[in-house]
Amino acid sequence: MRPAMTALLVLIPAAFSTALRAADAPAEMRKRYIDAQQAAGAGIRLLQEKKFEEAIAKLQEADKLVPGQGGVLYNLACALSRAGRSEETLDALERSIKGGFTDHKHMQADPDLEAVRENKRFKELVKLAERLGKPREPLVHVPDGYDRGGKRTYPLLIALHGAGGTPNSLLAAARQGLGADKFFLLAPFGSARMGPGYTWSSPDFTRIPELVAELKKKYRIGRVYLHGYSAGGHVGYLLVLKNPKVFDGFVPMAGALRRGMVSDAELKNAANLPIFAIQGAVDAVVPLKAAEQSLELLRQNGALTHLFKHEGGHTPPPNYPKVLADAVKWIDRQKGEE
């Protein structure tokens, strides 16, 4: 089965598709995606309870509602393997890889796949996952006019895209709002393929802090801000709580915290962390209430929080570059700087 951290790509509705937008998706489409998310979650719970045939039925239901989702299909492969259905296991595993689940190391170690471990086709599929799972190089913007021999330090903003997307639009908005000559910008691609784009998986939780460390060694970087949209926002919550010394502030947009994915000790890392959340009032993917509850939980653990609410859905606000710039200024004020 997928490890708990990567399971967020199954359990969070936003991870099913960037096509699910509150503003433009028909009601029946939204219902189908939500039903698929619920069926997938039930399937995972049944798999954990070792009710394999029931888990298979629920995961097949999720796949029928929203075909081709890598995480759902990987969990289906695990349930099929536990049920002794080897050929169906390999079929589901192949579809999961083509659907974006490419964590080949996890596949090789997962006890749920023990029954097919020595199968020749399984070994070929692991190689396929390794080949498809090689991450794309991140997009990096160096401030215009940066003097390598100078002394001035520059802030860094990391932008995490939504599931099935790419970071290009986030990078463009950040350059416009923050100033091309004032900020370093880092926009990584998720390490797993999802449709025409990318999404986040377990390797990213170590890769992103490592990318920050590499940039700090190469350039004069001061404060570090993390910004994430949709699934990138979900991942961002986990990153800031698990790496409190890496990030100085967080700007989630249409994202929420999954409480079960952080420990009580990690929640305490929210103390004095500035969080400026951007949220649509009619977001049907990540409801406003979910964003508010995330902020309240972190506020109870000492975070400094602010909610910017706009009238849209699961999309950036109309004046997104300005709102992002305002978020950074707000974080600076919480840190005692203008």
Image (tube, helix red, strand yellow):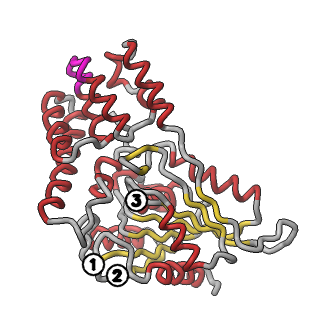
Amino acid of disc 1: Ala
Relative vertical location of residue 72 with respect to residue 198 in this rendering, above or below: above
Question: In whole angstroms, how far apart are the C-alphas of marks 1 and 2?
Answer: 6 Å
- The quarter of the image holding the C terminus is bottom right
Amino acid of disc 2: Lys
Amino acid of disc 3: Gly
Q: Does the rendering let one see residue 152?
A: yes
Earlier residue among tags 3 and 1: 3
Q: Is the Cβ of the residue at disc 1 closer than 8 Å to that at disc 2? A: yes
Q: Does the rendering let one see residue 331?
A: no
- Read off the residue under disc 3: 162
| 82 magenta-colored | yes
Earlier residue among tags 1 and 2: 1
- Read off the residue under disc 1: 281
- Find residue 59 and report its image quarter: top left
Q: x, y percentage for residue 30?
A: 18, 61
- Read off the residue under disc 2: 309
What secondary structure prevails in the magenta region? helix
Question: In whole angstroms, how far apart are the C-alphas of marks 2 and 3?
Answer: 19 Å
What segment carries the magenta color?
A: 80-88
- Find residue 121 and report its image quarter: top left
Classify 10 Å Cα crowding around label 3: few (below 14), some (14-19), many (20 and above): many
